[in-house]
Image: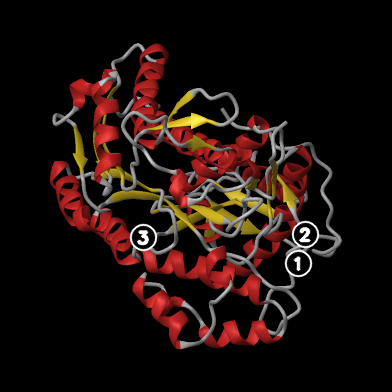
Amino acid sequence: MLDTFIRLGRVQIVVAKKDKYAWLEGAPPPPLEEHSIVKHSIISEYIHRYICTLLAGYAWDKLKISIVDGFAGGGKYTNILNDSIESGSPFLILNSVQEAQAYLETKFERSKEVQAEYYFVEKNTEYFQFLTSEIAKSQHIEKLNRNLFLYNSSFHAVADEIIKKISERNKAQRCLFVLDQFAYKDVPFQYIKKVMTQLNNSEVLLTFGFESLQSFLSDNIKSRSAMKRIGLEPYIDWNRLEELKRNGFWHHLIQEQLSLAIKTASGANHMTLFFIEPKKGWSYWLVHLSKQYKARSVMMDIHWDSANKFNGKFSHVIGDGLFGLGFKASKVPKQATFEFDDVMEFDKDGQLRCVNALTKDLSRFIYNNQPLTYQSLLAKIGDLTAATEGSIKEALQNLMNFKEVKIINNETKVPRRTAKQVKANDILSYQQQSLFSFDDLKIMTSPPKRET
């Protein structure tokens, strides 16, 4: 029986101590626990969808992409459930790209080519040798030193070199950095900002041990020094932190301040947080940082789809509709009134609640921000909702049915008949106040169908 349960978008499991994760010649690979299985699934699925999304249309036949694994480890694990040997992040990356290429070949008559380069970094020499040996025994050996490059180094020591190589490869500079650090301090955000600002189409998947900070983070020299070392200190509202600690919301505030600081310090336009909560030990976030809303949308789809894959037990602690980025403590001056305990499950009921709440919130939002294009709406609310784009369109359709909102075709100036037809530059126009108050508005609808 599994000693685990999945709740609140988090994976509950005993986290292995750091010394369990050792790759030594002649010894079996370290254990792969349930929380890592979920994390690996998300990484693998995102790479597959990223490639297939970009090459799905007729405009593109070739995609150049660079994928960096900054904490590669030895590349293999022993599954604790059945003792089978499983892929670590380097092989997950290689296999996901290969599987995406194979899928595209079966789906399209026209040739679709993925031209990927890989940069795998591991600072521990023994682990690096283990990884090198595993690659040498694999089908990917032919890529080594051709489009697969290995670095026996720390990530921050070679980050500038890798960024330079990616920037010189082509103008698009499409890249994904997978930074599965053990703690919160292994990747200073100065380096993440370089990735996000110096490369045109960059994304980062980062693990961040936020909960380990909660035990000591406060407005003092020790805390400020720790945050300064990783580049977050200027982006934390220290006065606000102390204010909410006095009101008994200090755990929530720390999470709020950290999420805001991560997004600001990184230079990303969009961020999603996926919670992984061990049964013992510190909880952490799988953070996705991106520049484009579409990337954020694909990742949010994966969060929802994971509910089906892992028995529908995922949820989000920050609500159904629109909410402030990060965690918002309630009942404190200058704070939103959203309650932390109001949990939205990533299941069918959660989808229904999400659309209903979003319908009310979008009504207010469009009224207060018009004139508004659909593209600007997505840009403004992207980090303020756990909704997929399909759910956003369904909420807009509800408002169209209530005759509160019109979607105007930007080219013909004619209203759209359905929200499914909406285009990026279409205008969202608030028409009139509903006969119902915003708070009384209740939408009866079926859970949103996922768009194909």
* Labels 1 and 3: the sequence-earlier one: 3
Q: Is residue 354 above or below residue 433?
A: above
Q: Name the residue under label 3.
A: 186
* Left-right relation of 112 to 429: left
Quadrant of the rendering where the N terminus is positioned: top right
Q: Residue at x 39, y 24 (%)?
A: 100
Q: Can residue 249 be seen in this view?
A: yes
Q: Position of residue 206 (x, y in %)?
A: 43, 52
Q: Residue at x 58, y 71 (%)?
A: 214
**SS for callout 3:** loop
Q: Which amino acid does label 2 sit on?
A: Asp
Q: Which amino acid does label 1 sit on?
A: Glu
Of the two numbered discs 2 and 3 in the rendering, the one whose residue sits closer to the viewer: 3
Q: Residue 314 carries which label?
A: none
Which image quadrant is residue 3 in?
top right
Q: What residue type is labelled 3?
A: Asp
Q: Residue 342 carries which label?
A: 2
In the rendered structure, are the residues bearing label 1 and label 2 in contact, judged by CB atoms less than 8 Å apart? yes
Q: Mark 1 points at which residue?
A: 339
The one nearer the camera, 270 or 147, is: 147
The one nearer the camera, 16 or 410, is: 16
Which image quadrant is residue 172 in?
top left
Q: Which residue is drawn at 31% across and 63% down?
A: 193
State the CA–CA distance, disc 1 to disc 2.
5 Å
The one nearer the camera, 29 or 388, is: 29
Mark 3 Cα-neighbour bin, 10 Å: few <14, some 14–19, many ≥20 = some
**SS for callout 1:** loop
**SS for callout 2:** loop
Q: Position of residue 158 (x, y in %)?
A: 19, 53
